[in-house]
């Protein structure tokens, strides 16, 4: 079971800063085996909430490709995307140029499929928050456009992976 340190700290009453190794020691003393401590997501750069305004199918290619106009709060950007599980008006996570996703995947503005792509609409797998790569991560709740998606998704947070000892 993966537990973010911030979630654990919501349930611990203390007036001092607690170090990760102290939390690990306490969990072990309570009968939990700590399998690993890692960083969840590990994303840097501009990762924001955007709304898909328009989807233009690009039909001249062997696989389905769409050119999307996305409002990222401060501007509208064009993004080439191969996923088909989202619609106009959906809220999505957008990695803008300058972002670095897990696996040292650098996002830049570039020409692809005959269009300029100004970022990437992300799946949960691409953000390393799930193994689900079936499509784009579509948000269910209303969030202000341009909001830092790292905070919304709890990315770059230390996570403790535990199992209960027999």
Image (cartoon, rainbow, N blue to C red):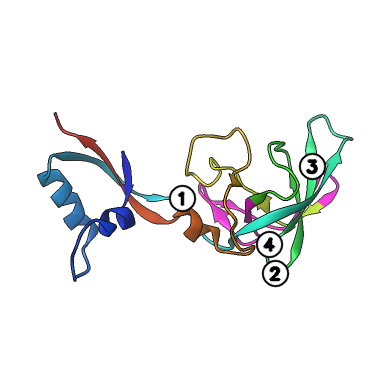
Q: Which residue is mark 4?
A: 72
Badge 1 marks a residue whose secondary structure is: loop
Q: Which range is magenta?
A: 92-115
Distance between the alpha carbons at the discs numbered 2 and 3: 22 Å
Answer whether residue 43 is visible to the viewer in this image.
no
Q: Residues within 10 Å of mark 4 (few under 14, many from 20)?
A: many
Distance between the alpha carbons at the discs numbered 4 and 2: 6 Å
Q: Residues within 10 Å of mark 1 (few under 14, many from 20)?
A: many
Which callout, 4 or 1, points at the residue further toward the start of the chain? 1
Q: Residues within 10 Å of mark 3 (few under 14, many from 20)?
A: some
Image position of 7 (left or right of 67): left
Q: Which residue is mark 3?
A: 66
Q: Nearer the viewer, mark 2 or mark 1?
A: 2
100 is within the stretch colored magenta: yes
Name the image quarter holding the N terminus.
Answer: top left
Q: Nearer the viewer, mark 2 or mark 3?
A: 2
Tally of numbered tags: 4
Q: Please provide percent x and percent y for residue 117.
A: 76, 53
Q: Which residue is mark 1?
A: 41
Badge 4 marks a residue whose secondary structure is: loop
Q: Which residue is mark 2?
A: 74
Which callout, 2 or 1, points at the residue further toward the start of the chain? 1
Residues under numbered marks 4 and 2 in contact, where contact means CB atoms less than 8 Å apart: yes
116 and 31: which one is in front? 31
Residue 123's mark? none
Distance between the alpha carbons at the discs numbered 4 and 3: 18 Å
Which callout, 2 or 3, points at the residue further toward the start of the chain? 3
Badge 3 marks a residue whose secondary structure is: strand
Figure quadrant of residue 13? bottom left
């Amino acid at each position: 079971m993966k537990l973010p340190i911030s979630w654990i700290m919501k349930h611990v009453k203390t007036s001092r800063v607690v170090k990760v190794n102290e939390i690990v020691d306490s969990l072990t003393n309570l009968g939990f085996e700590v399998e690993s401590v890692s960083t969840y997501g590990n994303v840097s750069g501009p990762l924001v909430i955007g709304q898909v305004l328009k989807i233009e199918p690009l039909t001249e290619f062997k696989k389905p490709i769409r050119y999307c106009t996305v409002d990222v709060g401060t501007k509208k950007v064009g993004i080439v995307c191969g996923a088909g599980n989202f619609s106009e008006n959906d809220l999505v996570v957008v990695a803008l140029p300058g972002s670095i996703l897990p696996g040292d995947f650098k996002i830049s503005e570039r020409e692809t499929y005959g269009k300029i792509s100004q970022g990437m609409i992300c799946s949960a797998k691409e953000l390393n928050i799930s193994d689900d790569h079936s499509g784009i991560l579509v948000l269910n709740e209303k969030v202000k456009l341009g909001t830092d998606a790292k905070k919304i998704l709890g990315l770059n947070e230390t996570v403790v992976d535990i199992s209960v000892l027999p």
